[in-house]
Amino acid sequence: MRSSLLLAAASAPAALAIFRDRPRNFIFVIPDGMAPVSQTIARTFLEAQADGIAIDQMPIGNTRTHSANNFVTDSAAAGTALASGFKTNNGALGVLPDGQPVGTILEAAKLEGYLTGLVVTSVINHATPAAFSSHSVSRNALPAIAAQQIGYSHPLNQSVDILLGGGTCYFQPRSAPTSCREDDTDLFAFAQSQGYTVLTNRSAFDALSSSRGRTPLPWLGTFSPGDLAYDLDRQSQPENVREPSLSEMTSQALSALDAGVRCRGPRCRVQRGKGYFLMIEASRIDHASHASDGAAHLHEVLEYNRVMQLVKEWIDEHPDTAMISVADHETGGLTVPSRYDVSKLGGAKKTAETLGEEWERYNGTDRRGFLTGTVLPAYGVGDASGAEVERLLGSGEDFALELANVLNARSGLKWSTGGHTGVDTTLFGYAKGRMGEELKVALAGNHDNIEIPRYLERALDVSLDKVTRELRAKGTAWIP
């Protein structure tokens, strides 16, 4: 079984790419849970059906997403496939179905002296970033995953150079009021002892921005106890405490990595001549789709498009850099039937999740008045009918979903499931000049998702199998 898996991965067409112009740096953007229809919605909302939007110039193929034990993957198995080039069971991270570890493209890059980064809007130790930087038989081993990411317990003593996202609670000892650990391990203290600059709020992020790349790596930034806010909710946060957006974090990470690869001296974390590998995840497209929240979904997809435009412009100015982007799977089974009208999504100022939390916290005596006067207008459905109001008042724990469906009825969006689906996802790519042409040739067509990291392996001239051998030399007792 092991040899057949190795053969299948190594013989994939993308793995055989020949590079005349090899990128020094590679950026991998993952819009978690996004399907082609998401771009249709964004394009329609922006009234760009005829001319298209920037990302419409970048599709080059698509990918198949099944896992080892299910035609419909989860993010852990999909992340493992995209990071390591191997199929595994749903729920597993960086290990095969038999529990043996497999190396990831981020680890392979780190082993050869590249700088590495993870920038996400979920908790930083969620399934996708975890699949690139840790190994666990269960994606739910979140405290242990966080420890591996900063080198506290990574078997190869590796640590990621830039970690930006949510998840503060996993780095705090259980004595901290907002901790979600069950032990006394203080990962923030450990990170600082290893030279990390630790950031946990907007002011720290702004100070980092003001330093213009002079703050040395590594960085550990977690700007919320859990996931970062949906972009729609983030926009209404007070400016002085507003969480950084995915595009803001991406911009800072790129500037820092660019400065880092030019570092000279004994304290530098890069090997001379090497570049960087950066994985960026628009994590909450998936969450919005699980919630059937069209407004939240739209704004997460728009932010993903802003990130893609930012990365394209960065590559135009740094032609030694290449980018690919592909969703790990689709979520929600989203469709747009005849006469759909996504302009109806524009009136929402908060997500259904946030308004559901406000509804749950409300302890006044006029729940109907709070619903019709505050909640419904904030979601852009102040015109809700009497029947819709009555359904919401009686919805109990399903309030947020029922609220989302009120807006879905107006926009025409249809969701076939609250889970994932097995549809193929669009593969985007961009690089300048001959490098860009080679990228398009290598990745044109339909690919199994395990082919993607083998392409990255060739592009960066690193070895996934070398990392796998080193991991397996450590046994398996270290795997949580």
Image (cartoon, helix red, strand yellow):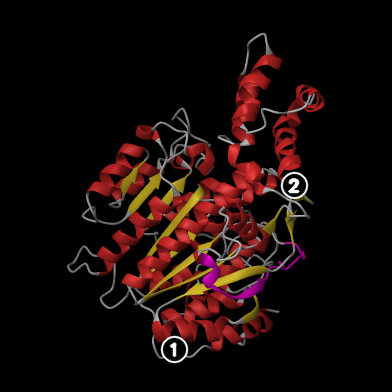
Q: Residue at x 59, y 71 (%)?
A: 427
Start and end of the magenta stretch?
Answer: 55-72
Which residue is painted at 21% across and 55% down in the image?
A: 214
Quarter in which the N terminus is drawn: bottom right
Q: CA distance from mark 2 to mark 1?
A: 46 Å
Rendered position, 230 above or below 79: above
In the image: residue 181, left or right of residue 271: right
Percent from the top left, x then y, of residue 34? 63, 58
Task: Classify 320 as above or below 331.
Answer: below
Q: Nearer the viewer, residue 336 or 338?
A: 338
Q: Can residue 83 be seen by looking at this rendering?
A: no
Instruction: Judge whether residue 115 is colored magenta.
Output: no
Q: Is residue 246 left or right of residue 131?
A: left
- What kind of element bears circle 1? loop
Q: Mark 1 = which residue? A: 19
Discs 2/1, front: 2
Q: Which residue is mark 2?
A: 412
Quarter of the image with the C terminus is: bottom right
Picture layout, residue 106 above or below residue 383: below
Residue 451 in sight from this viewpoint:
yes
* Picture quadrant where residue 329 is located: bottom right
* Residue 147 in the image, given as x and y percentages of width and height: 46, 50
Q: Secondary structure at mark 2?
A: loop
